[in-house]
Image (spheres, grey):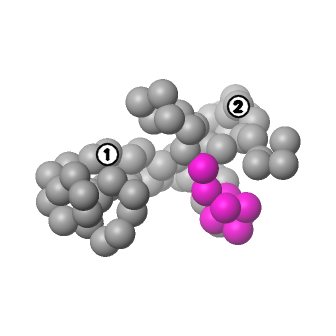
Amino acid sequence: MIGVIEDSEFWISKDQFEYWQYTQLCIDVIQGRGSSFSIEIPMGVRFITQSRLYTDEELENLEPVRFLED
């Protein structure tokens, strides 16, 4: 689990985390047709993700992530 969005836990796979662990992900929802994520097709909205690398100071102060088996 890498965070919480609107009281919902946001999970990615361990492989995805290995790739993105040094990156801040900002996820937004906008009107429009997306690909096939859970809310995109039935609700007519899509996810937009923006990213940037964390600074060294930010990396030191991150909260630990939770893995499913934790």
Tell me which residue sits at (70%, 68%) in the image. 15
Which residue in the protein does label 1 denote?
Answer: 28
Q: Is residue 4 visible?
A: yes
Residue type at tag 1: Asp
Observer-side mark, 1 or 2, equals: 1
Relative to 21, does residue 36 appear above or below in the rendering? below
The outermost residue toward the right is 70
Q: Is residue 55 visible?
A: no
Please identify the dominant SS of the magenta region: helix
Q: Secondary structure at mark 2?
A: loop
Q: Position of residue 31 (x, y in %)?
A: 15, 52
Tell me which residue sits at (44%, 54%) in the image. 51
- Residue 21 horizontal side relative to residue 36, left or right: right
Relative to 2, does residue 40 appear above or below in the rendering? below
The quadrant of the image that shows the C terminus is top right
Q: Position of residue 54 (x, y in %)?
A: 57, 45
Residue type at tag 2: Glu
Magenta residues?
A: 11-18
Considering only order in the chain, which callout, 2 or 1, is on the residue closer to the N terminus?
Answer: 1
Q: Residues within 10 Å of mark 1 (few under 14, many from 20)?
A: few
The answer to the question of whether label 1 and label 2 lie on touching residues, with beta carbons closer than 8 A, is no
Which residue in the protein does label 2 denote?
Answer: 63
